[in-house]
Image (cartoon, rainbow, N blue to C red):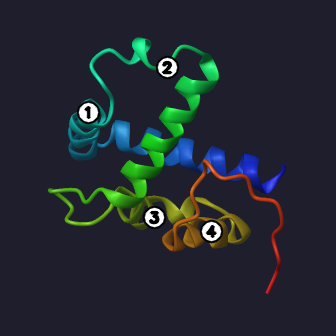
């Protein structure tokens, strides 16, 4: 699996975790309402535009927001509760998210080391 596809899959894992968590899910709904316009169909006409704004929101929420309940980012909550479920290679990629690897960017080259 290509690294950029894997990163998108991890972002989906993190967002699904947030949607299932009783505290993060409430905060996620509030942030989504603040992030998006009340009539997104007026601004985002194509699937690509909708997908792009969804990815921007996911990046914003995961990396920038701080949970009022957990007092840390949704990313840190996810890592503390789920990192052990991944193999060592995937753990290293997920830990790289702490350095703000955003999924909306295309990864062109990865240098090991």
Label 2, label 4: how many angstroms apart (C-alpha)?
A: 35 Å
Which is closer to the viewer, label 1 or label 4?
1
Which is closer to the viewer, label 1 or label 2?
2
Query: Residue 57: which numbered mark, if any?
Result: none
Give the mark nearer the N terminus: 3 vs 4.
3
Identify which residue is drawn at 73% across, 69% down: 89
Pointers 3 and 4 in contact (CB under 8 A)? Answer: no
Residue 5 rendering spot, x and y as whole percentages:
74, 46
Tell me the quarter of the picture where residue 43 sits: top left
| SS for dot 4 | helix
Q: Which residue is mark 1?
A: 29
Give the mark nearer the N terminus: 1 vs 3.
1
Pointers 1 and 2 in contact (CB under 8 A)? Answer: no
| SS for dot 2 | loop
Give the mark nearer the N terminus: 1 vs 2.
1
Which is closer to the viewer, label 1 or label 3?
1
Label 1, label 2: how many angstroms apart (C-alpha)?
A: 19 Å
Residue 107 rendering spot, x and y as whole percentages:
75, 58
In the picture, measured across the screen, residue 38 lies left or right of residue 91, that is left
Q: Which residue is mark 2?
A: 44
Give the mark nearer the N terminus: 2 vs 4.
2
Q: Which residue is mark 3?
A: 79
In the picture, measured across the screen, residue 31 lies left or right of residue 108, that is left
Label 3, label 2: how many angstroms apart (C-alpha)?
A: 32 Å
């Amino acid at each position: 699996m290509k690294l950029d596809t894997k990163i998108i899959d991890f972002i989906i894992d993190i967002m699904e975790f947030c949607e299932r968590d009783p505290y993060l899910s409430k905060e996620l709904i509030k942030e989504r309402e603040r992030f998006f316009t009340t009539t997104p169909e007026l601004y985002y006409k194509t699937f690509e535009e909708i997908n792009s704004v969804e990815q921007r929101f996911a990046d914003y929420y995961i990396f920038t927001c701080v949970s009022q309940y957990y007092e840390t980012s949704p990313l840190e909550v996810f890592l503390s509760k789920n990192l052990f479920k991944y193999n060592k290679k995937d753990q290293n990629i997920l830990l790289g998210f702490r350095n703000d690897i955003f999924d909306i960017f295309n990864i062109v080259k990865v240098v090991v080391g």
